[in-house]
Amino acid sequence: MSSKRKKIGVFDSGIGGFSILKRLVEILPGHEFYYLSDLPHSPYGNKSTEYIQERCQVITETLLNEGVDLILIACNTATAASIDSLREKYSIPFVGIEPFVKSIESLDFKDEQLKPVVLTTIAMGESDRFKSLMKRYDPDLRIYHQSCPSLASLIEKAFEDGLSSVELDLETELKTLVNKGFTHAILGCTHYPLIETKIESFLGLKCISPCLPVAKRVAQLLEARPLTGRTELFFKTTGEESFKTFEAALLSLG
Ligand code: DGL
């Protein structure tokens, strides 16, 4: 375990990665975090694999220029499209996030009442990585899958407009899941945990999010521990010149 201050790069198509950044800041106070939002090129959920791979490369270069020690791909869709090629090309450690991984163990498949649904973007749901995860974690086909074409963008907009999650209208995206007996929703897009309680009350189920275990994986890989100094948070969107500091209070929506 090291007491050296680490620089941790985090990126997403927008503010979705805040859901993991929030956990990271909780478990690793005193370190430096560089958050890059690819807002001008969002959402990733309706883009091709090639497009997302290109974006991830540009973003990686930007974060490397800041001297980060590790890059957290705080986006399921970008992880599916790019983590393998990024790991091949760069020697820095990458941590990704994927539905099921580190979240599925909380489900009791012996329970016959169990009826989980996994929510993803369209690109994530269509990716080879998602299909192979489904095969690996759900060989008995117990988990229903729903792609949500605009949910990430709705959350992004609510955040921009400064709305509370209560004002978000989930009707168009999730109404087909209401009253279908679903017991759990696995959140397969990092935007969704930002409105976790809203999804739980709208669908009457429990949400499962891998954000905390993923944050712990970052700490483990870096051999980092909480430090007593000030936590430094830097943010920018792609296209902007330089990172600016921001306050941890901005990390939650409503
Ligand atoms: N937050 C991203 C994810 O985890 C995707 C949102 C988007 O469609 O850009 O998949």
Image (spheres, helix red, strand yellow):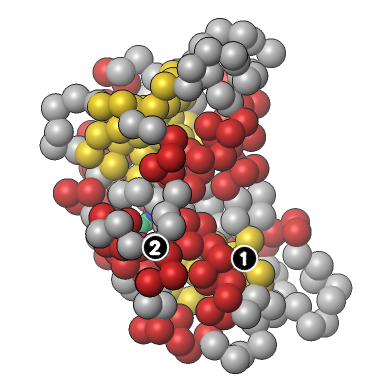
What's the amino acid at mark 1? Cys
67, 241: nearer the viewer: 241
x, y percentage for residue 65?
27, 18
Q: How many marks?
A: 2
Q: Is mark 2 within 8 Å of ligand 1?
A: no
x, y percentage for residue 214?
59, 41
Identify the image quadrant of residue 64. Answer: top left
x, y percentage for residue 119?
50, 69
Labels 1 and 2: the sequence-earlier one: 2
Q: Is residue 122 visible?
A: no
The N terminus appears in which quarter of the rendering? Answer: top right
Q: Which residue is mark 2?
A: 164
x, y percentage for residue 33?
42, 26
Secondary structure under tag 1 reads strand
Q: Is residue 218 above or below residue 230?
A: below
92, 18: nearer the viewer: 18
Give the quarter the ligand 1 occupies.
bottom left
Task: State the mark number for residue 89.
Answer: none
What's the amino acid at mark 2? Ser
Q: Is residue 89 above or below residue 132?
A: above
Residue at 35% x, 15% y: name it: 67
| Image position of 22 (left or right of 206) | left
Residue at 38% x, 72% y: name it: 167
User: Closer to us: mark 1 or mark 2?
Assistant: 2
| Image position of 221 (left or right of 108) | left
Residue at 58% x, 34% y: name it: 26
Q: Which residue is mark 1?
A: 207
